[in-house]
Image: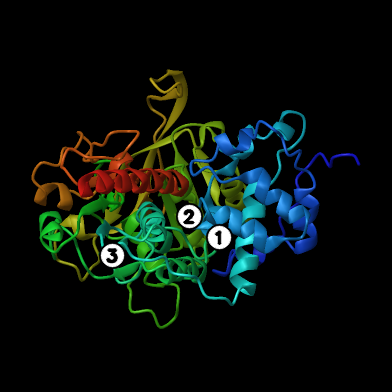
Amino acid sequence: MAIKPNKNDMPVQEAAVRAKNFSEVALGYSAEIAVAEADRCLNCKGRPCVEGCPVNVSIPEFISKIKQNDFEGAYNIISQSSSLPAVCGRVCPQETQCESKCTLGIKFEPVAIGRLERFVADYHNFNFNGKTVKPVLNGIKVAVVGSGPSGLACAGDLAKKGYKVTVFEALHEAGGVLVYGIPEFRLPKEIVKKEVDTLRQYGVEIQTNVVVGKTLTVDELFKKGFSAVFIGSGAGLPRFMGIKGEGLKGVYSANEFLTRANLMKAYEKDSQTPIMHAKNVAVVGGGNVAMDAARTALRLGAENVYIIYRRSMAELPARKEEVEHAEEEGVKFEILRNPIEILGYLNENDSRDTKNGFVTGIKLIKCELGEPDERGRRRPVEIEGSEYVLPVDSVIMAIGTSPNPLIKNTTAGLEVNKHGGIIVEEKTGATSKLGVFAGGDAVTGAATVILAMGAGKTAAKTIEEYLSKKGK
């Protein structure tokens, strides 16, 4: 039978409809479509797709199960490597990881591995009613700081080996960036809750509203009987450009804007969380977070939303799918532009300093691409005299985040780099402090969900080896 050259399309909501609601955009494969897509897999002996997966999911094996209509069998294979398959199937950049290594992709479009993973996980979550068998506890306690993808991956792997794992989460809901950063229309929170509940069934305890570094310290965790600590606290400290006007009302970090919308549900009519429902919004940045912020602003009622990016469309770091969805929904792209000032005015009844005024526009300067930088990307060069003002009443800065300094400032002997990231041994996740391990955005700065999970899994393996030697 001839191989179908293109992926089977993912059913989605119509753009004009979805731009006005927070329901999930992608609707998922049916069983029939999933089997048809699985039939495109060549089942290569070399398994190059597995090499491209940071958590080494046995991809050909789970796809073979789909071909046989054994969807639960496919889930069992995936769950041996991944603690969050329904999440990964939705938000991982498969196009630059597993799918980029797909042999079929040499001549045709690669197999839609991410869409198949999502289908299998959703099938299991909807149909499986059995109880997870808890492993026998070995009596050793491990603390995990942060319930984002890195922390959950580490906790899941250790719990399955019999360790008593307690996860400490600073916010009131578990999930980290999965609940506060990624919008409902890309990753429904019910999906995250289901994945977290599965880990609880393995015995993982999750304590929310615990700020490690303030409520208690890393050293105090050891005093409470924990034999090892994994730090997966993410990178929640927002960055700004340092330009004039960033203190005006209507200027947000993407971190705050998305947290208010996602975790605190500012889009609901009875929400107690204040958020500006601006008519004209500028989002500065070109990554996935920028796309999330722009598309959220549209759904909150904005008439015009602009992505401000200093390079060209070809250099946008966001996933191609997210850029396409944003364009379809009406987001406008102001490319080769760099902000140099945010403009504003004072309300007549506001007698305070001008920094408390309201946004009226953002001053941009045009750019052109020059020579490549140290990472091979062509540098944006500002064009003198090309400044102009884009009228907006809100600006969202989506130019990256850094690790929160709270843990490093309260943990003696924990070395960090100049960006505040915890320094670890790359292959183990071990830090400079004995018994403390780290991974994910707390180490690298803002990165992808799957890379954070990979770091959590690496650390879990190292922690097990460390505790095994310690016990001898």
Q: Quadrant of the N terminus?
A: top right
Where does the image place residue 393, in percent across and percent down from the top left?
38, 58
Earlier residue among tags 1 and 3: 1
Where does the image place residue 223, in percent across and percent down from the top left?
10, 60
For disc 1, the marked residue is 86
The mark lying in front, picked from 2 and 3, is 3
| Observer-nearest of 157 and 13 | 157
Q: Hey, what amino acid is under mark 2?
A: Asp
For disc 3, the marked residue is 166
Determine crowd level at label 3: few under 14, some 14-19, many 20+ residues with C-alpha closer than 10 A.
many
Earlier residue among tags 2 and 3: 3
| Observer-nearest of 169 and 393 | 169
> In the rendered view, would you say 150 is above or below 41?
below
> In the rendered view, would you say 107 is above or below 65?
above
Where does the image place residue 279, in percent across and percent down from the top left?
46, 63
Q: Which residue is depicted at the point 59% across and 63% down?
A: 19
Determine crowd level at label 1: few under 14, some 14-19, many 20+ residues with C-alpha closer than 10 A.
many
Q: Hey, what amino acid is under mark 1?
A: Ala
Does dot 3 land on a helix, a strand or a loop? Answer: strand
The mark lying in front, picked from 1 and 3, is 3
> Furthest-right residue in view?
1
Look at the image and tell me whether residue 430 can be seen. Answer: yes
For disc 2, the marked residue is 292
As measured in the structure, the alpha-carbon distance from the residue carrying label 2 to the one carrying label 3 is 31 Å
Where does the image place residue 336, in percent across and percent down from the top left?
47, 33
Earlier residue among tags 1 and 2: 1
Look at the image and tell me whether residue 402 can be seen. Answer: no
As measured in the structure, the alpha-carbon distance from the residue carrying label 1 to the one carrying label 3 is 23 Å
Q: Hey, what amino acid is under mark 3?
A: Thr
> In the rendered view, would you say 392 is above or below 302?
above
Q: Is residue 129 left or right of residue 265?
A: right
Q: Which residue is depicted at the point 34% across and 65% down?
A: 137
